[in-house]
Every structure is written in structure tokens, then in C-alpha cells.
Image (tube, rainbow, N blue to C red):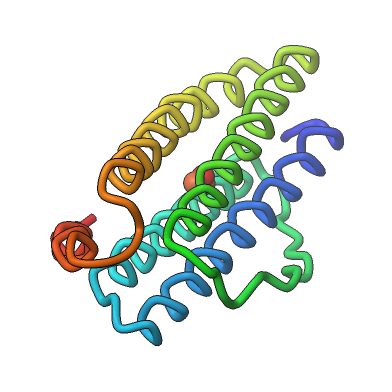
């Protein structure tokens, strides 16, 4: 059984992961509407990944005999004026999530819950990958600018993402 503090903190994290999923789903819908199906594909896969993160936490709670209590998911934005703005927001958001995961690790240590600390290591590594992949996209956007011809190729490239 998890401590009450950890149980509350993981329940909050599940909400943060689902909010992330909702944010990326909104971005996906925005770019579908804008005719950038490759970018929409990238955000749809990101949406799935965030749902998987939430599921991973829920399965862990169940394994430890704790009950998941889902909370309302706050509203997200529905449009972005440039691609750069959307990916900058994505990177900023992933950095916030990294901070939340680090706080969970700190709490698990304080509670001397080493199983939870061990489970969280997967998320620590995952956040490094998440930030790196978004940074790469932003680097590309900074090179090509976020309008015009090159965006066609950029969209095709993001359309290749499969997982
Ligand atoms: Fe679940 Fe993108 O962090």
C-alpha cells in the first residue's frame, strides 16, 4: 500500500498526464484543420503516449492496492498562431512534467518507498527522450522558418512518425 501522500501525488500526476493528452489532442485537431496532416499525426501519437503514461501510473496504483481517483481535466487551448509557438509550448509543458516527475522521486525518497522510486526511473528516462525529440523539431523549425515551402517537407517528415 502506498502512503496517503504518495497516493495523492500519483493521483495528481495521472491528471497531469491526462491533461497533457488532452493538450496534444487539441493540437492534433488544430493541425488537421490547418491541413497539416503530418503535424497532426505527430500530436495524435503524442496524445496516445500521454494516455499510456497515465495508464502506467494507474496500473502501478492498482498493483500497490491503492485506488485511482480521476479528477476533472481542465480546458486546453484550441489554436496556435504558428508551428513554432505550438512546439515551444510543447517543450515548455514537457519541462513542467519533468519537474513533476522529479518532485515525485523526491517524495518517494522522503517516504522511503523504494519500489515507487524504482518505477519512477522509467519516467525520468522517458522525459529526457520527450524533451530531446521536441527540441529536435524546434531546431528544425528554427532552421527552415515556420512558413513557406519547407513546411511541406516538414509536415511529410512528421507524418512518418509511427509510435
Ligand atoms: Fe507524460 Fe510527455 O510526459
Residue plotted at (53% across, 69% down): 81
Q: Quadrant of the C terminus?
A: bottom left
Residue 148 position by quadrant: bottom left
Outermost residue to the bottom: 33
Q: Front-most of 138 and 57?
A: 138
**Residue 122 image point, x, y percent:** 44, 29
**Residue 8 image point, x, y percent:** 81, 43
How many numbered badges does the structure rendering display? 0
**Residue 36 image point, x, y percent:** 29, 76
Image: 45 above or below 120: below
Q: Front-most of 60 and 10?
A: 10
Q: Quadrant of the N terminus?
A: top right
Q: Front-most of 28 and 60?
A: 28
Horizontal side of residue 157 vs 75, given as left or right: left
Residue plotted at (40% across, 87% down): 33
Horizontal side of residue 102 vs 52, given as left or right: right
Q: Is residue 162 visible?
A: no
Image: 74 above or below 132: below
Residue 105 position by quadrant: top right
Q: Front-most of 70 and 148?
A: 148
Horizontal side of residue 36 vs 157, given as left or right: right
**Residue 97 image point, x, y percent:** 61, 39
Image: 70 above or below 62: below
Residue plotted at (14% across, 62% down): 153
Residue plotted at (58% across, 52% down): 58
Q: Is residue 149 visible?
A: yes
Amino acid at each position: 500500500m502506498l502512503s496517503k501522500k504518495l497516493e495523492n501525488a500519483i493521483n495528481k500526476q495521472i491528471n497531469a498526464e491526462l491533461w497533457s493528452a488532452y493538450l496534444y489532442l487539441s493540437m492534433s485537431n488544430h493541425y488537421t484543420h490547418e491541413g497539416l496532416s503530418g503535424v497532426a499525426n505527430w500530436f495524435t501519437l503524442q496524445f496516445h503516449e500521454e494516455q499510456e503514461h497515465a495508464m502506467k501510473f494507474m496500473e502501478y496504483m492498482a498493483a500497490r492496492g491503492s485506488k485511482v481517483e480521476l479528477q476533472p481535466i481542465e480546458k486546453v487551448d484550441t489554436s496556435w498562431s504558428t508551428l513554432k509557438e505550438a512546439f515551444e509550448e510543447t517543450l515548455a509543458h514537457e519541462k513542467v512534467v519533468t519537474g513533476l516527475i522529479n518532485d515525485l522521486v523526491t517524495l518517494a525518497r522522503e517516504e522511503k518507498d523504494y519500489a515507487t522510486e524504482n518505477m519512477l526511473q522509467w519516467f525520468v528516462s522517458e522525459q529526457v527522450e520527450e524533451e530531446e525529440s521536441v527540441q529536435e523539431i524546434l531546431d528544425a523549425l528554427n532552421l527552415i522558418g515556420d512558413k513557406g515551402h519547407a513546411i511541406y517537407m516538414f509536415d511529410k517528415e512528421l507524418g512518418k512518425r509511427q509510435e
